[in-house]
Image (cartoon, grey):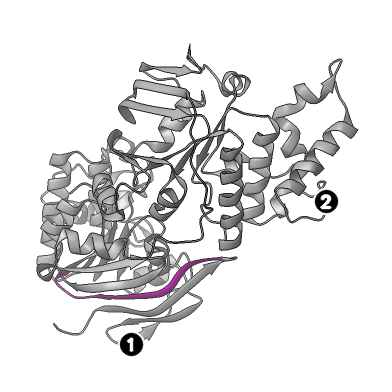
């Protein structure tokens, strides 16, 4: 193999107490497709943002043609010949195809935009990709696949030597994905170095020449694709010890409290069946696009299902709003705590008592002393690190913000607590505290649905694990009945 076009060594990046990358190692070669593989949270997205200039590494080295470089911004990345095609296309909908391709670098003549040249160059780039699109077509009319092609044409217009594709086929049909892979092969034949990030093993095995596997922010394996297999890659992905410090408890689940039958909301999820028992943690595992969060939002009344039934404690329910779900004892700690879980500008105390104001009020008036007492009690029970309960939530760390959101719902005395990525983006100490609290709540009889993309977390915490892929249930595993590789295979498109 010739020398790499781009090479990363010892890349590290932390956000507060969370280490996103601890030892990022990667080499990309001209005329070769390298698949970057890893679970959610393995550090792939952080690596891409470092290469595109969004984040700067805390340590480590980036080399292009064996020369050290620094990527401080997107223009830096573009100047160095690096382009990124994101899963969610970066497209300006009010501009045309041609304007999107040459955004920031439009050809000029006598100080004015040279529209004729821009259209001609657009046609040439699209012809190179064997995609006939009208250069004057408004971008808002493009399909997701066509938007990806416009991004690829933009990379070609910059004469990028390194093209990074982050989950490019996640939202594409089979036919559209095949067309995109054809374009990837063409870029490879032109001598470009391509980094291809995907959870779909059929695509990885079909398109990649080399692989790099990340786990827990570190590179754990790399090599030639012809020398490995899906089983080998999966083993690298989940090769860590699952014996982490998760709370030990004896699961004594009671009677069924929730039954979901044939629940469907197109196109997010289809025909989902699940059961939840009293005093049980039901883990829901899946990768990007599995439909897990969308399912939880329907159970919480944020959205309505197209069909199917939900039976809560023996009675059929059809929540039209979160308020109805809360009154029935079903609450949701959302994945996006900052935008959906907490009112950042309000105090810790106000956040904690917000859903329970009716119960704390007397004759229609909220009693300040009673509310403050409840807020202090739950802040102390969850060990929220703060000055006092009057401190704004926006001043807290991510882990303590999560504890405030949990306290808010626990004060409401729910029957079912839905946790969507409860430890996402929080440090190790806060994770342990959330896990311990979750275990204690279940032992007290609360029923919990825990959605997580961290396989060790669901294996360490859940009594049963429901696996989803592309909006459908693909497996149900009792605690200890399956190893990590078996569960991961059920979640993967292989």
Q: Is residue 93 left or right of residue 303?
A: left
Q: Which residues are magenta?
A: 18-32
Tell me residue 386's x, y (percent): 77, 55
Q: Is residue 50 left or right of residue 142?
A: right
Q: Secondary structure at mark 2?
A: loop
Which residue is found at the position 16% from the left and 42% from the top?
Answer: 176
Nearer to us in this view, 385 or 59: 385
Disc with the residue nearer the chain's start (1 vs 2): 1
Which residue is found at the position 31% from the left and 65% from the top?
Answer: 239
Cα separation, mark 1 vs mark 2, equals 52 Å
Name of the residue lying farthest toward the right: 369
Q: Which mark is residue 67?
A: 1
Q: Is residue 395 left or right of residue 256?
A: right
Q: Is residue 43 visible?
A: yes
Q: Is residue 333 positioned above or below 203 on the image?
A: above
Q: Is residue 267 visible?
A: no
Q: Secondary structure at mark 1?
A: strand
Which residue is found at the position 29% from the left and 34% from the top?
Answer: 473
Which quarter of the image is occupied by the N terminus?
A: bottom left
Location of residue 114 by image quarter? bottom left
Q: Which mark is residue 421?
A: none
Tell me residue 491's x, y (percent): 28, 45
Location of residue 67 by image quarter? bottom left
Give yes or no for residue 19 being in the magenta stretch: yes
Magenta part mainly helix, strand or loop? strand
Tell me residue 152's x, y (percent): 24, 56
Give yes or no for residue 203 being in the magenta stretch: no
Q: Is residue 146 positioned above or below 261 on the image?
A: below
Name of the residue lying farthest toward the top: 315
Location of residue 356 by image quarter? top right
Nearer to us in this view, 172 or 477: 477
Residue that badge 2 annotates: 388
């Amino acid at each position: 193999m010739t020398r790499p076009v781009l090479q990363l060594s010892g890349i590290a990046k932390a956000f507060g107490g969370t280490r996103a990358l601890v030892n990022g190692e990667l080499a990309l070669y001209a005329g070769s497709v390298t698949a970057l593989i890893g679970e959610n949270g393995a550090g792939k997205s952080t690596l891409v943002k470092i290469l595109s200039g969004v984040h700067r590494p805390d340590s480590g080295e980036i080399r292009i043609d064996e020369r050290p470089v620094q990527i401080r911004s997107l223009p830096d990345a573009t100047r160095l010949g690096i382009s990124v095609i994101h899963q969610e296309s970066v497209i300006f909908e009010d501009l045309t195809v041609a304007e999107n391709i040459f955004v920031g670098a439009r050809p000029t003549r006598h100080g004015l935009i040279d529209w004729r040249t821009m259209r001609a160059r657009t046609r040439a780039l699209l012809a190179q990709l064997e995609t006939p699109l009208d250069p004057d077509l408004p971008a808002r009319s493009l399909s997701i696949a066509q938007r990806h092609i416009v991004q690829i044409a933009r990379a070609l217009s910059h004469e990028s030597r390194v093209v990074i594709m982050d989950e490019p086929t996640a939202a594409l049909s089979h036919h559209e994905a095949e067309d995109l892979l054809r374009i990837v092969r063409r870029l490879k034949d032109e001598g470009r170095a391509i980094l291809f990030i995907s959870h779909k093993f059929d695509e990885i095995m079909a398109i990649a020449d080399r692989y790099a596997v990340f786990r827990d922010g570190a590179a754990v394996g790399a090599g030639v694709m012809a020398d490995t297999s899906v089983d080998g890659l999966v083993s690298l992905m989940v090769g860590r010890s699952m014996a982490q410090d998760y709370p030990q408890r004896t699961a004594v689940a009671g009677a069924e409290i929730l039954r979901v039958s044939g629940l469907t909301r197109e196109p997010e999820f289809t025909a989902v069946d699940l059961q939840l028992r009293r005093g049980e943690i039901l883990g829901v595992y899946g990768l990007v696009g599995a439909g897990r969060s969308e399912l939880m939002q329907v159970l919480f009344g944020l959205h309505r299902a197209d069909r199917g039934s939900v039976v809560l404690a023996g009675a059929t329910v059809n929540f039209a709003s979160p308020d109805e779900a809360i009154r029935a004892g079903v609450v949701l700690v959302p994945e996006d705590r900052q935008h959906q879980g907490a009112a950042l500008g309000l105090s810790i105390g106000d956040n904690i008592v917000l859903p329970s104001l009716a119960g704390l009020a007397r004759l229609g008036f909220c009693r300040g002393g009673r509310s403050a007492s409840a807020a202090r009690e739950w802040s102390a029970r969850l060990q929220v690190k703060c000055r006092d309960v009057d401190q704004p939530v926006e001043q807290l760390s991510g882990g303590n913000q999560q504890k405030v959101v949990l306290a808010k719902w626990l004060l409401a005395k729910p029957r079912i607590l839905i946790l969507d990525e409860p430890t996402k983006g929080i440090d190790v100490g806060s994770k342990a505290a959330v896990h311990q609290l979750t275990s204690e709540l279940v032992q007290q009889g609360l029923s919990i649905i825990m959605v997580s993309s961290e396989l060790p977390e669901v294996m360490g915490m859940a009594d049963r694990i429901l696996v989803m892929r592309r909006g459908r249930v693909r497996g149900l595993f009792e605690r200890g009945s399956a190893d990590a590789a078996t569960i991961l295979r059920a979640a993967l498109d292989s």
